[in-house]
Image (tube, helix red, strand yellow):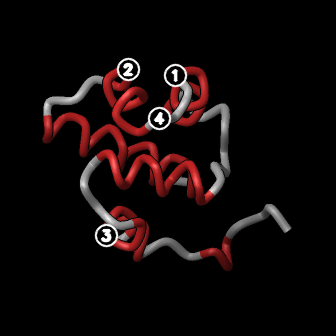
């Protein structure tokens, strides 16, 4: 699983747990619907921290809390070919 798939999974998981549709998350976070759609479809591979911050706030979380979960904590950037 690559890095972008990990945070897509996190967004979808939190939406499911809280009963929030992606379009509702867009309005709650003040992130454009198209931007959020591009993120969850995997078209945007590396969203800005400002965008992740807005999404985290919509879930009533800090960015640190939003990014603190097993799959991301276990991810190794050493295997990443983006450099």
Q: Which residue, given by chain and number where applicable, does mark 3 sit on?
A: 65
Mark 1 lies on a secondary structure that is helix
Q: Which mark is residue 33?
A: 1
Question: Can you tell which quarter of the image residue 65 is in?
Answer: bottom left
- Residue at x 70%, y 67% (from the top left corner): 80
The first of marks 4 and 2 along the sequence is: 2
Of residues 44 and 60, the one nearer the viewer is 60
Q: Is residue 18 above or below residue 47?
A: above
Mark 2 lies on a secondary structure that is helix
Q: Nearer the viewer, mark 4 or mark 3?
A: 4
State the CA–CA distance, disc 2 to disc 1.
6 Å
Packing grade of label 3 (10 A; few <14, some 14-19, many >=20) is few
Mark 4 lies on a secondary structure that is loop
Residue 73, percent across and down? 40, 76
Q: Residue furthest toward the right?
A: 83
Please report contact status of discs 2 and 1: CB closer than 8 Å, yes or no: yes
Residue 46, percent across and down? 67, 51
Of residues 1 and 12, the one nearer the viewer is 12
Packing grade of label 4 (10 A; few <14, some 14-19, many >=20) is some
Residue 76, percent across and down? 56, 76
- Residue at x 42%, y 29% (from the top left corner): 26
State the CA–CA distance, disc 1 to disc 3.
23 Å
Q: Which mark is residue 68?
A: none
Q: Nearer the viewer, mark 4 or mark 2?
A: 4
Mark 3 lies on a secondary structure that is helix
Q: Which residue, given by chain and number where applicable, does mark 2 sit on?
A: 23
Please report contact status of discs 3 and 2: CB closer than 8 Å, yes or no: no
Q: Which mark is residue 30?
A: 4
The first of marks 1 and 3 along the sequence is: 1
Q: Is residue 60 above or below residue 36?
A: below
Packing grade of label 1 (10 A; few <14, some 14-19, many >=20) is some
């Amino acid at each position: 699983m690559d890095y972008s798939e990990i945070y897509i999974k996190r967004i979808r998981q939190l939406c499911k747990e809280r009963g929030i549709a992606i379009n509702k998350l867009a309005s709650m976070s003040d992130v454009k619907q198209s931007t959020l759609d591009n993120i969850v479809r995997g078209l945007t591979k590396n969203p800005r921290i400002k965008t992740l911050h807005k999404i985290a706030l919509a879930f009533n979380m800090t960015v640190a809390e939003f990014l603190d979960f097993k799959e991301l904590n276990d991810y190794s950037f050493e295997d990443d070919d983006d450099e």
